[in-house]
Amino acid sequence: MSSHHNIASPARSFLHHIKELPSRSETLSSQGAVESIYSQSQYSKSSESTAASSIDDVHTPRPLIPGVYVPTVAFFEAFTEDLDLETVAQHAVRLAKAGVAGITTQGSNGEAVHLTHQERRSVTKTTRKALDDAGYQSTPIIVGCGAQSTRETVELCREALSSGGDYALILPPSYYKPMHRSDTVMEFFQDVADASPVPILIYNYPAAVGGIDLDSDMIAQLSKHPNIVGCKLTCGNTGKLGRIASAVDATNPWDANSGFMAMGGSADFIIPTLAVGGSGVICGLGNIAPKACVKLVNLYTAGKMKEAKKLQAVVARGDWAAISGGIVGTKSVLESYFGYGGLARRPLPRPAKDEIMKYAKDFKELVDLEKSL
């Protein structure tokens, strides 16, 4: 876990030049100008039916509630690498039956960077339909919509809405990292929030964006935007998460408060997330052990600390195996223990037999627990 200090990326700090965001009325009055810039799409026709006139009348998303959210794996056919939408649907329903609070598509575990825009839409549409058909109409879907330009990010947000998504999860742009300053990153999130037809969550994952690490001051400042409703911290900095939760009066399992969702980004610090006032987690380990993650939240919120700490230790060991194996290991374990999972898209490697055996061994304790629940 990262040390609990408000330290930004060693390569570039975003602590300086943070400017005040406008009020809600100022945001809405300026939104039309921002949307006019991004109203024409070069990626799809979906924006024709999803253009927004204001934040209030665009979309009524399914509410986010405290708990466990799972960034789902994308599944592919073995030889063609075409999307395996049948497995996408079955997996989403398995997670919903386990009691998760919501699902995230197009996250890091979902190989979003390997998918076309059309494939992204297909995964989200399939997930929404599968949940609805299985009786989970109220389960919200958060859609990963990060891209390197403001224009494409807004387009992905529009496509998320047209595909059945409720919220957008957005990384900061990073390809031209040396040219970005704190004010350009702030403007990026503000401009996207102005133009997006769905509410957005800020995604802080330094390892995925060249070390860019948004600090608590910046995220708290951005939380004032009426269309920014949460954050996911995969940096592992629970001190930062606690500062944000306090500053924004975040929703937690005991109080609705402001409604802002301050989310941890990994299952190995579920208890620390809740202990500092966080709202829950968006954790990749939930693909393998959703019941265990949900039970851990329930034990802690019920005050059963001894049982919760014992379960957190098992979950943390499993999460370390997931972190070590990445998406290749996660898919391998799903295949070994649950009969589906398949392979990641090339150029990600194919696990060798000894690696498959190692992944299975590393996850055995957690999977045995999961299957007992």
Image (spheres, rainbow, N blue to C red):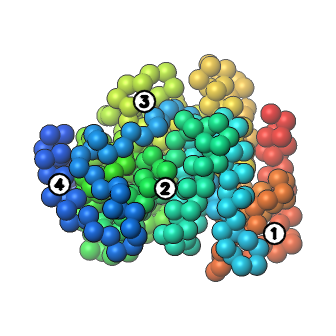
Side (left or right) of 91 relative to 6 = right
The answer for how far apart the CA atoms under marks 4 and 2 are is 23 Å
Mark 2 and mark 3 residues within 8 Å of each other at the beta carbon: no
Within-10-Å neighbours for mark 1: few <14, some 14–19, many 20+: some
Q: Amino acid at mark 4?
A: Gly
Give the amino acid type for the residue marked by disc 3 in the picture.
Answer: Thr
From the top left corner, tell me how far across and down residue 225 is, in percent.
25, 44
Residue 276, horizontal then vertical, whole percent? 47, 32
Determine which residue is flagged by label 2. 163
Q: Which mark is residue 32?
A: 4
Q: Relative to residue 144, is residue 11 depicted above or below?
A: below
Residue 352 rendering spot, x and y as whole percentages: 82, 75
Looking at the image, tell me whether mark 4 or mark 2 is earlier in sequence order.
4
Residue 276 visible: no
Q: Residue at x 14, y 51 (%)?
A: 30
**Relative height, residue 34 to residue 224 (above, below):** below
Distance in Å between CA atoms under marks 2 and 3: 27 Å
Is 349 or 240 nearer to us in this picture?
349
- Mark 2 vs mark 1: in front: 2
Residue 251 numbered mark, or none: 3
253 sits to left or right of 174: right
Residue on which disc 1 sits: 355
> Badge 3 local density, few (<14 within 10 Å), some, or many (20+)?
many
Mark 4 to mark 3: distance in Å?
30 Å
Res 40 quadrant in image: bottom left
**Residue 137 appears anywhere in the view:** yes
Q: Disc 1 or disc 3, which is closer to the eye?
A: 3
Q: Earlier in the sequence, mark 1 or mark 3?
A: 3
- Comes first in the chain, label 2 or label 1: 2
